Amino acid sequence: MIQLHDLKFEPYISEEEIEGAVAKIASRLNADYKDQNPIFIGVLNGSFMFASEVIKRFKGDCEVSFVKMGSYEGTSTTGTVKTLVGLNQKVEGRKVVILEDIVDTGNTLEEINKILEAEKVADYKVATLFFKPEAYKKSLHIEYIGIQIPDKFIVGYGLDYDGLGRNLTQVYKRKE
Ligand code: 5GP
Ligand code: MG
Ligand code: MG
């Protein structure tokens, strides 16, 4: 068990399980995008570790960019997604793959969808390491899903609780 700020967390998803999920997504991306020169767009802050691990495994040409979105305060979503750092790269006509740490309500994805529609990308797909199907309220299709989890608050592997926990190499869930 670990403590971050005022909350206790217990081990939930091991490094091995995470690595297996990352490797599966990476191998599908290699199959689908090897000769497509995709642009990978990581959604900061949470996706930095997942983005790095997936992109390291990609074998073809690719470009890498990031946007920074925020909606969470503490352990719950505020419902309003802010674009903190926008897309500063031309993506018109390109194949884009969004890399997310976790999709929860889908509010963040919807906001990213708006940005990409306005940019006239050729095609874009979403890859997320974690997905909470019970919390997802949108209809946007998520092509690559690593691990589905129940509607619980997790930290580690890029995900934080009020700034802490991003460096943890396994995932912990909030102890009830
Ligand atoms: P959504 O917009 O889909 O509701 O939430 C997306 C963002 O909320 C994620 O990218 C992540 O930053 C944050 N988030 C959602 N669920 C969790 C969670 O269980 N733990 C942490 N640390 N952040 C979460
Ligand atoms: Mg995220
Ligand atoms: Mg956060």
Image (cartoon, grey):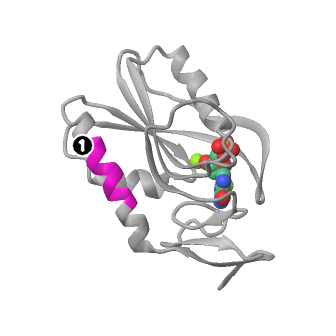
Q: How far across and how far down the image is residue 79, in percent?
A: 78, 40
Q: Quadrant of residue 153?
A: bottom right
Q: Indicate the position of residue 57 as horizontal and vertical percent values.
A: 26, 53
Based on the displayed image, in which of its 4 quarters is residue 156 positioned? bottom right
Q: Identity of the amino acid at label 1?
A: Asn
What is the span of residues highlighted in magenta in the rendered image?
21-30
Q: Is residue 29 magenta?
A: yes
Q: Nearer the viewer, residue 126 or 168?
A: 126
Residue 114 percent across, percent down from the top left: 60, 22
Residue found farthest to the bottom: 1
Residue at left offset 25%, top offset 47%: 58
In terms of secondary structure, what is the magenta stretch mainly?
Answer: helix
Residue at (70%, 64%) from the top-left corner?
161
Between 67 and 151, the one lying in front of the other is: 151
Whether the residue carrying mark 1 lies under 8 Å from ligand 2 is answered with no
Foreground of the two, 88 or 110:
110
Residue 11 against residue 113 in the figure, above or below: below
The quadrant where residue 68 appears: top right
Relative to 155, say whether 86 is above or below: above
On the rendered image, what quadrant is the C terminus found in?
Answer: bottom right
Residue underneath mark 1: 30
* Place of residue 93 in the rendered image (x, y in percent of width and height, measured from the top left): 36, 15
